[in-house]
Image (cartoon, rainbow, N blue to C red):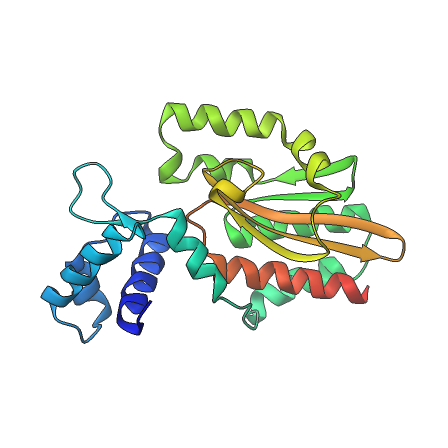
Amino acid sequence: MDERKELILNTIIKEHIKTGLPVSSGVLVEKYKLNISPATVRNEMAVLEDEEYIIQPHTSAGRIPTEKAYKLFIENIQPKKINQSDRAGLEELLEQSTEENLKNAAKKLSSLSGATVFWAFHRHNLYYTGISNLFQQPEFSELSIIYDISAIIDRIDEIINDIFDEIEDGINIRIGSDSPFGSFSGTIMAKYKIGEHTGLFGVLSPVRMDYEKNLTLINFVYDRLKII
């Protein structure tokens, strides 16, 4: 993909992550000052739509990114330096690897990410928090999707037991059709070891997730666990 098309696609993704709304060419030109003419933006968006990176939901004038777009996007993201307030909030909770500390770290992660957080202290000992964050997302307002999410939540222990051994050590991002929690979801997971102990934790969200922020948070916690 050429630089201009990639710039437009990444801007659409970032705007959609922020708002949850379809993104129009007008928004891109007026809000982001891309130094590209409106006509060029419209033409490039038409090509991106033909290539199945964006789609037009319903009769909206705007477009939203597809799973294909998000997969391309996450190929190029890296964890950033965590901001000081987030760091301070997590660091104190990660001084020890007790189950209580890690549960509190999970709650803090859920608050910072706006996502559901799960933490398997080992294969058959799971804690999760922030379920209400899923139901607050605009893309989960339809009854059929609410039913799908509820079914996943009912099976979350079983799902994590099934994937626990297959997940590689380190950080894993799985979205859409690759997500073990369903095609409507995205997840960033980290599998870690403390001595002989192996655990798995992560965030669960719609495919529309702030991957840069959440990867930074997960990476920070993962790095701290390695030095406990």
Which one is in front, 71 or 138? 71
Residue at 74% x, 59% y: name it.
Answer: 94
Residue at 29% x, 58% y: name it.
Answer: 12
Q: Is 7 positioned to the left or the right of 89 in the image?
A: left
Which one is in front, 119 or 136? 119
Q: Is 4 positioned to the left or the right of 108 in the image?
A: left
Image location (x, y in percent) of residue 102: 74, 50
Image location (x, y in percent) of residue 133: 49, 40
Image location (x, y in percent) of residue 185: 49, 41
Vertical order, 112 against 2 (above or below): above
Residue at 63% x, 49% y: name it.
Answer: 202
Total numbered labels placed on residues in the image: 0
Residue found at the far bottom of this picture = 35
Image location (x, y in percent) of residue 76: 47, 67
Residue at 45% x, 51% y: name it.
Answer: 209
Which one is in front, 84 or 209? 209
Quadrant placement of the C terminus:
bottom right
Vertical order, 171 against 6 (above or below): above
Residue found at the far left of this picture = 39
Quadrant placement of the N terminus:
bottom left
